Amino acid sequence: MNAIEPLAWYGALIGLFIAIILILKKINPVYSLFLGAIIGALIGGGNLVQIVAMLTSGTQSVMGTVIRVLAAGVLAGVMMESGAAETIAKAIVRKMGESKAIFALALATMIITAVGVFIPVAVLIVAPIALSVGNKMGISKLALLLALSGGGKAGNIISPNPNTIAAANGFNVNLSDVMIAGLIPALFGLMMTVIVASMLKSKGVMVSGPEAAEAYGSKNTKDDRAYPTLGKAIVAPAVAIVLLMVNPIGSIFNISILSSVKLDAMYVLPIAGIVGLYAMGQKDKLIAYTTSGLEKMTATVLILIGAGAIAGLIAASDLSAQIVDLINVMGISGTFLPPISGILMAAATASTSTGTILATGTFGHAIAAIGIAPIASAVMVHTGATVIDSLPQGNYFHITAQSMNMTIKQRMSLVPYEAIVGGTMTIVATVLYGFIL
C-alpha cells in the first residue's frame, strides 16, 4: 500500500463492522473477516491490486503467532489426552475437601487452564466433579458453573494458550512477561469468583442425584487406574513454566547468565509436552496426542489468519490516527483504549482468543501511537477480552451450558456474574498497569 495515500478510515471501520455482523450471523469467522477486509478496502478507496497486497501483508504479520499457537498444541494435546489435567483437578478438590468446594473447583479450573488446557475443555474436565460435589453439598448449578468459568477466566490470562500468545505477539513482548503480568489480576478474579459464587450457591436449580451419577457414568469414561499420578501429571506444565521463566527471573534478580537466555514458546511448549509424555510413560502416544492438540488449534489458527486480513486493512488506513485524534479531542485518557478494545472485540466474537486477536490487530497501532507501554497494553487488552466473551453466538456458552445440563435461559443468567469476574480483572489490570506502574 502507498503510505502517502492511506485508505479512508471509514472504509476500515465499515469493513470491521461487516466482519462482526457476519460472525454474529453464524457465517464462518474466517470468511467473515476476509470479506469484511475486502469490502472495507473497496469502500476506503483501494483498488484490486492494492487489496491483494493488503491481504498478503496482513496475513503475513500474524505468522509468528500462528507458529507459536501450533506449537502450543503439543502441550495442550498431552495435558488433555493423557488424563494429566483430570489428575490435577481431582487432586486439588480432594486435598481441599468438600467444605471448601467452591474455592477448590475455581482453583482447579484456574490451574488446569493456566497450564495450557483450553478453558472450554477445562470446564468439561472439572464439571463432573462439580456436579457430584454440588449434589452432596447443596450448591446450585449457577454457583458451580460460575466457579468453573470464573476460575477458568483467571487461569486463561496467565496461560500459554492462544489468547495469551496473541496478546504477547500483538505487542511484541515475551509470552512469559504477559503471563507474569496477568497474575495479580488473575488472583483478584479468582477471589471475586469465590465471593460471588458463594453468594449464589442457594440460587437457581440444584443438582439432582441422577445428574451427579450420570456425569461420572457417561462423561468420565476413563478408568482412574489409567490416570497418571499427580507427580507425573505436573511434569509437563512444570517444565514449561520453568523454561519460560528463565529470562524473567534473570532480569528480576540481575543474573546475566539467565537474562541472556532467550527461550521462546515456539519450542518451549512442545519440549515441555514431550518431556511430560515421557515422564508419564506414554511415549507411544506421542503421535496421537500431538495430532489431537494440532486439530484443536486449527480453528484458532484459521481465525488468526482472518484477523490478519482485518489488521492489514486497518494498517493500510488512517483509522489509527483518527482514533488517537478523537481521544485527544474528547479529553479521555488513552489508557482506556486497550481494555475497551478487548471488551468490544470479545463481546462481538464471543471468544477470548478471537477478541484478543482482533483487538491487537485492529487497535494495536492506535494504542502504540498513544504511547502506552507494550506489556501494559497486552495485559489490558487481554483482561478486557474476558469481560463479556461468553455470549450465545460463541461455542463456549453452549459447551458450558451442556456441561451443567442447563437451559439457554439458565445459562444466560450467568453472563452478568461472569462479567463481574472479568470486569474485576480488567479494572485491576488497568489501574495497576495503566496508572500505577
Image (cartoon, rainbow, N blue to C red):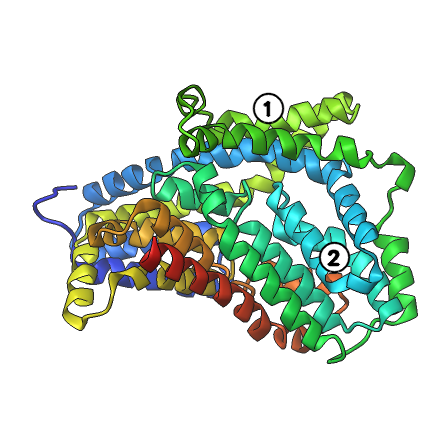
List x then y, in percent, for residue 221.
87, 46
In the image as oriented, which residue stretches furthest toward the front? 253
Q: Would residue 26 be found to the left or right of residue 239 on screen?
A: left
Q: Is residue 31 visible?
A: no
In the image as oriented, which residue stretches furthest toward the top? 257
List x then y, in percent, for residue 151.
63, 57
List x then y, in percent, for residue 253.
43, 31
How far apart in space, not on screen, are marks 1 and 2 (Cα)? Answer: 30 Å
Instruction: Please rate how many residues cluster around mark 1, counting C-alpha atoms within 10 Å: few if below 14, some from 14 to 19, many from 20.
Output: many
Determine which of the numbered discs, if any, sits on residue 271 in the image.
1
Relative to 359, does residue 293 appear above or below in the rendering? above
Q: Would residue 232 be found to the left or right of residue 356 on screen?
A: right
At horizontal 65% and vertical 30% (from top left) the residue drawn is 290
Toward which corner of the image does residue 330 lie, by quadrant? bottom left
Quadrant in which the N terminus appears? top left
At horizontal 75% and vertical 51% (from top left) the residue drawn is 125
Q: Would residue 212 be found to the left or right of residue 391 on screen?
A: right
At horizontal 73% and vertical 54% (from top left) the residue drawn is 124
List x then y, in percent, for residue 337.
31, 61
Residue kind at label 2, given as amino acid type: Ala
Toward which corner of the image does residue 292 lie, by quadrant? top right
> Which residue carries the number 2 mark?
104
Relative to 190, does residue 171 appear above or below in the rendering? above
Please tell me whether mark 1 sits on a helix, a strand or a loop: helix
Which is nearer the N-term, disc 1 or disc 2? Answer: 2
In the image as oriented, which residue stretches furthest toward the left? 4
